[in-house]
Image: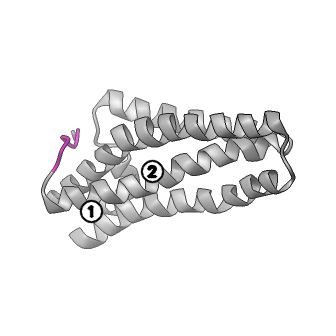
Amino acid sequence: MRALAILWGVGGIVLLLVSALGRLVPMAGEAIASGLGALEWSALGLNVAGMAWFEGYRGFQRNFSPRVAARARHLADHPTTTRALLAPIFCMGFFAAPPRRRAGAIGLTLGIATLVIAVRQLAQPWRGIVDAGVVVGLAWGVVTLLVFTARAFGRGLARPPEVE
């Protein structure tokens, strides 16, 4: 049960991120293929760099990925049926977490949903330019999530799991 819970927890999150990448890569590619002007290329470069820093490094590498890995390790060490069945949302901190962490997970999810709706309203190439930055951040997130998970099960945790 432990191995399946971990695979479901981390794997479910990775599948969610990869699914988003699968939807966004074509939009970004379409924008680039459409022939960008100097302003659009500048916006693309700034957006990709900014999203790499804020979403990839600060969001995923410094916060989300280590926390998910720590909670996955906790799930492996202290499995319960409920946590195993709901492993992806357990690992993301939606339940069995301190109130502040739960509120943060919910707030972040609502914020992302709002931004997705807003970005969908943009015309090309601007939608693709935004999506290109998100692709970089999400790809960074997938890699760091896998690295931190491997570390959590290899040499131990770098962060407490914040579990109630």
Residue 20, horizontal then vertical, whole percent? 60, 56
Q: Is residue 149 left or right of residue 51?
A: left
Q: Is residue 158 magenta?
A: yes
Dot 1, crowdedness within 10 Å: few (<14), some or many (≥20)?
Answer: few
Residue 96, horizontal then vertical, whole percent? 28, 42
Which quarter shows the C terminus?
top left
Q: Which residues are magenta?
A: 157-163
Residue located 37% across and 53% down the image: 144
Q: Quadrant of residue 44?
A: top right
Mark 1, secondary structure of its residue: helix
Which quarter shows the N terminus?
bottom left
Label disc, if present, on residue 81 of the rendered structure: 1
Mark 1 or 2: the one toward you: 2
Residue located 35% across and 60% down the image: 146
Q: Is residue 24 magenta?
A: no
Q: Is residue 125 left or right of residue 109?
A: right
Q: Is residue 25 above or below residue 41?
A: below
Q: Please, what is the three-letter code of the amino acid marked with disc 2?
A: Gly
Q: Foreground residue, 95 or 105? A: 105
Residue located 40% across and 51% down the image: 89
Q: Is residue 89 left or right of residue 155?
A: right
Residue 53, horizontal then vertical, whole percent? 48, 36
Residue located 23% across and 38% down the image: 162
Q: Which residue is mark 2?
A: 141
C-alpha span from label 1 to label 2 = 28 Å
Counting residues from the N terminus, which is met first, the one under dot 1 or under dot 2?
Answer: 1
Q: Can see residue 100?
A: yes
Dot 2, crowdedness within 10 Å: few (<14), some or many (≥20)?
Answer: many
Mark 2, secondary structure of its residue: helix
